[in-house]
Image (cartoon, rainbow, N blue to C red):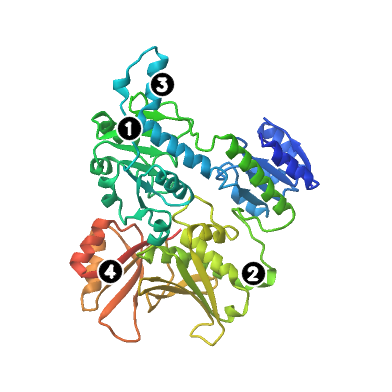
Amino acid sequence: MRVLIAEKLAPNAVTLLEAAGHTVDVKLGMTAEETIAAIGVYDALIVRSATKVTREVIEAGTNLKIIGRAGVGVDNVDVDAATERGIIVCNAPTSNVVSAAEQTMCLLLASARKTPQANASMQAGEWNRSAFTGNELFHKTLAIFGLGRIGGLIAERAASFGMELIGYDPYCSVERAASIGVTKYETVDEILPLADFITVHLPKTKETIGMFGSRQYARMKDGVYLVNTARGGIYNLAEMVEYLQNGKIAGAAIDVYESEPCTDSPVHGLDNVILTPHLGASTVEAQERAGIQIAEYVLLGLENKMVPTAVNVKLVPDDVMGAVAPYIPACETLGVILAQLSREAITSAELTVSGELAEYDVSILGTAALRGIFSRNTDDAVNFVNASYIATQRGVSITVVKDTKQQEYKSKVSLLTMNGSKRVEVGCIVSGLHRETRIVSLLDYKLDLIPRKYVLVMKYEDTPGKLGRIGTVLGNANINISTMEIGTLEKNTGEAVVLMNVDDPVSPEVYEELVDSVGVTDGWFIELL
């Protein structure tokens, strides 16, 4: 087959593709028009970050079977257009993790010892030792926000410097954190006053953008050092300036920015700030690793084999797909709901498939549930190929149980995890002309509701007048209840659960008013994709 490499790739990667018998053409610096004109004869396309693989490019690639991005992320590839045409899109997400971890350690040390500032002074012909007295890492406390692959490597390296390690990651279990030498804390606020150094390794989500601002900076230990090699915007740089100027924050080292290239920002020009131009993956080794990895994955795709980092497509036999297809989005929905219902990081889950559906190979439904669980807490594009891979990396397991016995419904799926000794469960059926997902059990209560984007779940003592109070509180907050359902248990416990679709998000302040007015004993505001 024919492979087009549109950007510079490690020579060993080209050799690997050619050794498999494929014809490889390296054409660098092509314009969009030139790419569209050339792509039609190629079976595979490999790019880095500069080439924009647009819908027009993909539609012109009539022979394309796979698109490989030699690096992390696929922002420059129209994944939807590729999926529509059955083209695999894959990347090399682990290629730069060592380089990113080492860049983090580099910036930690450079900040603590003021190395770039001292170098600039020397280059200017000065000798001013007293101006650059720094701090040791030894016996200092490092807070790692985000305990995934890179966070784990940071922990390993920082431990060798004799640092005390603490961390925060709502999707990492206490056991997993302990296995990499990190004491996990459950909230951001409780960890901030403890850290001498803070480094962030979090995905870019609506929860993490602006995660650190004035309120968080004020709670930090005096003289703290901050590092960001993850995603621009996690630290609010405009609100950081005051704390850098008054010494509350002793120094900051920033490698990533909200908009890149970045040649100006609120912290440009401050002498206790180190700025680097997104160098986390900029090592010879990372570039070599990215090339080799993407070449290996492209070879798998050309051989119609499983591609571990594919971000979009997995082939399922037509007969199986016909039966299970309606339950794929249903199981994703269950995963999204369970991830928000669980009070603890999910390390294991059980998907039970009951009734006629259990007669088929339903393994893809377990993958769909994982995709839902991970959808809210990772930058990775989670799909039916890589969900299991991501689960393995994060120490999460899922068991699929089939029950073909006659059930209350023709077919039903339910997803369960345990918070200590407490069951956290959600179940659904698929019904109707449009094959809609209906939640029919929640926390073991029976009910029946088609969930929409914003879902409010509340438990309270079942006494007269409570629903009226709920309506009053939400109405005063201008939040409309579109549909609702009261859950029941086989045995009356005196406690009710209500599941309702609302038209707008429920703020913490509104929820607290519900607690005070209604006597809510437990509750969740759930946002679906």
Query: Badge 3 is on which residue?
Result: 119
Q: Is residue 203 at all visible to an observer of this figure?
A: no
Residue 400: % across, % down: 54, 73
Crowdedness near tag 3: few (<14), some (14–19) or many (≥20) residues, C-alpha within 10 Å: few
- Which quadrant holds residue 73? top right
Tag on residue 432?
none
Query: Circle 3 sits in a helix, a strand or a loop, which is it?
Result: helix
Q: Nearer the viewer, mark 3 or mark 4?
A: 3
Q: Is residue 91 at all visible to an observer of this figure?
A: yes
* Cα distance between the residues tagged 3 and 4: 57 Å
* Cα distance between the residues tagged 2 and 3: 62 Å
**From the viewer's perspective, is 336 left or right of 435?**
left
Q: Are marks 4 and 2 in contact (CB under 8 Å)?
A: no
Query: Circle 1 sits in a helix, a strand or a loop, which is it?
Result: strand
Query: First in sequence: mark 3 or mark 1?
Result: 3
Query: Badge 1 is on which residue?
Result: 251
- Amino acid at the residue labelled 4: Asp
- Amino acid at the residue labelled 2: Met
Q: Nearer the viewer, mark 1 or mark 4?
A: 1
Q: For the image shown, how many numbered marks are present on the structure?
A: 4
Query: Badge 2 is on which residue?
Result: 321
Q: Are marks 2 and 3 in contact (CB under 8 Å)?
A: no
Query: First in sequence: mark 4 or mark 2?
Result: 2
- Amino acid at the residue labelled 3: Asn
Looking at the picture, does residue 274 appear above or below residue 434? above
Query: First in sequence: mark 3 or mark 4?
Result: 3
Query: First in sequence: mark 1 or mark 4?
Result: 1
